[in-house]
Image (cartoon, rainbow, N blue to C red):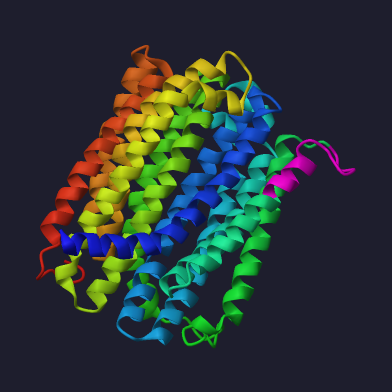
Amino acid sequence: MQSILKEARGTLLLAVPIVIGQLSQMLMGVTDSVMIGRVGTVPLAASSFVGSVFNVFFIVGVGLLTPVAIFASRSRGAGRPEEAGEFLRHGMLIAVVSSLAGIAIIAFLGLRLEWFGQPDEVIQAVNPFLTLIGVSLLPALTYLALRQFAESMGRPWVPVIVICSGVLLNVFLNWVFIYGHLGAPRLGLTGAGVSTLISRTLGTIVIFAWLRLDPAVRGAWPKHWLRPVSPAHVKQMLFVGLPAAGSLLFEGGAFAAATVMMGWLGAVPLAAHQIAISCAALSFMVSLGIAIALGMRTSAAVGAGEHARLRPLWIGGTLMGLTFSLGFTAVFLFFGPAIARAFISDPRVIPVATVLLGVAAVFQIFDGGQVIHSCALRGLTDVRIPALITFTAYWVIALPAGYLLGVRGGFGAAGIWTGLAAGLAFAAVVLGLRFVRLSRADVRSGA
């Protein structure tokens, strides 16, 4: 127990700035939803649809960039700072290439919106918001690579300051462009896209300049950005990044598919889904921050050859995540109607959103558990089997159950979310059991 508490304190100290950064990043989307909801139900529903499309590509980028945190932390733990910089350099390349591919696909999908079977009024409201959010994928992923490098180098507060400033800027720009203040045209949903693109771009520029001038990371900062690409580094990063991206794609794709199914039910359930998913995603950021910190500390322990720390690290992180998840469960259960009214005044949407928040109160416990176990396994560079587990959880259990309960079974929006909860529960249990098996003191990287 003493070892668990010691490791939990270390994880918490690293997790606090990461959690604040994750919450701040998510607040950008939540404030968008609140401010768009004031324009109307249809724009809020359209933003939900666009968000689900964007998140599929963003989540793939998150997986592809996971090696930046893992290998930079491992290099730092082994006392090789210049090697950590090389992982950043190659991570930035991966971020640019993957984001450009994502932007091209999003642009194509913008011409084929009828494929998704959404309400006509929602489809008509989607563009040019979809295009603007799609272009913001480039600064979003390059910022992510820089943020993971900063956190791996023990500078987690740098991204926090940048992203918090970005949130404040986004709120101000939303006020200007959504509602038409300070002489700007009233752009509504499009104004939110303009604000997000500007905020993400400036945030990326600022964090790059900050890290470039930070003496604490000077030894690891790449000195030759245009040096030829190392096939060995790319191969090493993709060995971990591709399965991680697949695992996250299964998850993000499932939530995107759930959003599409919500659209089949109408604009009101889709708007209610946006409210509930925004709140669930916000609370999820706490567990995700703990998970990221746990993954980096697990990777550093492996790099330092301290395998006996793995089990205490995981137990401490899991208990912290569970504690915070239970706190948010109580908030969703007792304050569901008030939360829904904070987003929108439409009396048709509020009761549906309240029910979904009740389901979210339960499934976020499992969602927090699965992400903590998954990041801990990535710290061991165990990504292939977790990807298969994630596929089973979402595409064999969650989506079929959600379709049968919500679309075919008459339970509506709550049925779709119940299916998601079932898949998350499966992932949390099975991934946890896998880490228990792999975290013996004699485990080696890549086991």
Residue 111 visible in the shown view: no
Task: Examine the structure image and report whether residue 172 is included in the region drawn in magenta.
Answer: yes
Task: Examine the structure image and report whether residue 86 is included in the region drawn in magenta.
Answer: no
Q: Which residues are magenta?
A: 170-185
The furthest residue to the top: 410
Viewer-proximal residue among 238 and 315 = 315
Question: Where, quadrant-wise, is the C terminus in this rendering?
Answer: bottom left
Q: Is residue 292 above or below residue 429?
A: below
Residue sitting at x 63%, y 47%: 133
Viewer-proximal residue among 217 and 103 = 217
Residue sitting at x 37%, y 48%: 287
Q: How far from the left and from the top, in percent, is residue 231?
A: 39, 79
Residue sitting at x 63%, y 34%: 34
Residue sitting at x 39%, y 18%: 407
Q: In which quarter of the view is residue 419 placed?
A: top left
The furthest residue to the right: 183
Q: How far from the left and from the top, in percent, is residue 309?
A: 18, 68
Q: How far from the left and from the top, in percent, is residue 183?
A: 90, 43
Q: In which quarter of the view is residue 384 placed?
A: bottom left
Question: Where, quadrant-wise, is the N terminus in this rendering?
Answer: bottom left
Q: In which quarter of the view is residue 312 placed?
A: bottom left
In the picture provided, is 55 more to the left or to the right than 13? right
Q: How far from the left and from the top, in percent, is residue 75?
A: 34, 80
In the picture provided, is 382 more to the left or to the right than 108? left
In the picture provided, is 9 more to the left or to the right than 64? left
Viewer-proximal residue among 171 and 235 = 171
In the picture provided, is 251 more to the left or to the right than 187? left
Q: Is residue 391 above or below residue 397?
A: below
